[in-house]
Image: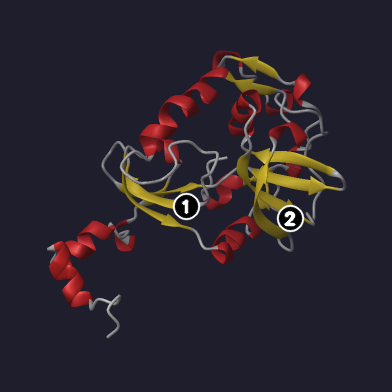
């Protein structure tokens, strides 16, 4: 055996771990114990984090349906992880909610504080998160970077308006899922950042049509269909 190789048995002896202790330290997810898929914000204690393979992420994105269930807009799309400048993006939403972006700034570092991951979301990839909810049920949640659709020459935020807003204000780029060759038109008309308004959640319109520019409700992307907290 070359001098720079170590047998696994010798390695365990050097770090003073038994095989069982080593396995415990890996924090492997307990798939058979998962009770439900929930939003990441509802995980109160993370037990395991698993990076998503590209092909698995593509399967998730391609499985997203429109709210009217008639289309899978991304079924044949090209999907990749890219670094984006929020200033280059268009928006379909009329509002960002002050409490939402404040919670991102305050809570995101806490969510991953036991793991050696970026404390913010600028450089995060896609992950499956396993952990406990407030009722101590073992659950699965996703972290998916913002999703950007390309329509002709325009790039528009489909999911992740608050993360992009924060980074635009700070002058930062961030990771995003970039989707080309979309089968369905974007559900809103496309607008510039200077048309968005910052409001408190208490002023959020109850009518979804008032939250978006020229919304076609049937074409709205139903992220929750696959458990993504959009």
Residue positioned 61% across, 19% down in the render? 204
| Residue 39 in the figure: left or right of residue 25 | right
Q: Secondary structure at mark 1?
A: strand
Residue positioned 74% across, 55% down in the render? 71
Given this view, does label 2 or label 1 mark the residue nearer the observer? 1
Mark 1 or mark 2, which is nearer the start of the sequence? 2
Figure quadrant of residue 212: top right
Residue located beneath label 1 in the image: 127
Disc 2/disc 1 C-alpha distance (Å): 26 Å
Quarter holding the C terminus? top right
Q: Of all residues shown, which one is farthest toward the bottom? A: 1
Residue 71 is tagged as 2
* Chosen colour scheme: secondary structure
Residue positioned 57% across, 59% down in the render? 57
Q: As displayed, is residue 68 above or below residue 21?
A: above
Q: Secondary structure at mark 2?
A: loop
Residue 164's spot in the image, x, y percent? 63, 33
Quarter holding the N terminus? bottom left
Q: As displayed, is residue 188 above or below residue 19?
A: above
Residue 135's spot in the image, x, y percent? 28, 38
Residue positioned 51% across, 45% down in the render? 124
Figure quadrant of residue 98: top right
Residue 221's spot in the image, x, y percent? 68, 45
Neighbour class for label 1 at 10 Å: few (<14), some, many (≥20)? some
Residue 5 is tagged as none
Residue 156's spot in the image, x, y percent? 75, 39
Asked if the residue under mark 1 is in contact with the one under mark 2, i.e. CB atoms within 8 Å, the reply is no
Residue 164 in sight from this viewpoint: yes
Neighbour class for label 2 at 10 Å: few (<14), some, many (≥20)? some
Q: Of all residues shown, which one is farthest toward the right? A: 152
Residue 91 in sight from this viewpoint: no
Between 30 and 193, the residue placed more toward the observer is 193
């Amino acid at each position: 055996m070359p001098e720079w190789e170590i047998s696994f048995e010798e390695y365990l002896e050097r770090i003073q771990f038994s095989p069982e202790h080593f396995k415990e330290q890996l924090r492997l997810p307990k798939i058979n114990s998962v009770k439900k898929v929930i939003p990441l914000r509802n995980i109160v204690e993370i037990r395991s984090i698993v990076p998503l393979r590209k092909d698995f992420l593509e399967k998730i994105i391609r499985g997203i349906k429109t709210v009217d269930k008639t289309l899978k807009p991304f079924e044949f799309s090209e999907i990749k992880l890219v670094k984006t400048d929020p200033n280059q993006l268009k928006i379909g939403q009329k509002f960002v909610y002050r409490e939402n972006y404040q919670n991102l700034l305050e809570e995101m570092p806490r969510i991953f504080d036991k793991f050696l991951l970026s404390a913010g979301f600028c450089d995060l990839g896609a992950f499956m998160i396993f952990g406990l909810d407030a009722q101590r049920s073992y659950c699965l949640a996703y972290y998916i970077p913002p999703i950007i659709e390309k329509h002709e020459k325009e790039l528009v935020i489909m999911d992740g308006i608050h993360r992009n807003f924060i980074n635009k204000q700070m002058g930062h780029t961030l990771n995003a899922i970039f989707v080309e060759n979309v089968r369905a038109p974007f559900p809103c008309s496309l607008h510039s950042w200077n048309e968005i308004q910052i409001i408190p959640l208490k002023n959020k319109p109850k009518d979804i049509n008032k939250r978006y520019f020229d919304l076609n409700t049937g074409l709205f992307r139903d992220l929750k269909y696959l458990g993504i907290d959009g």
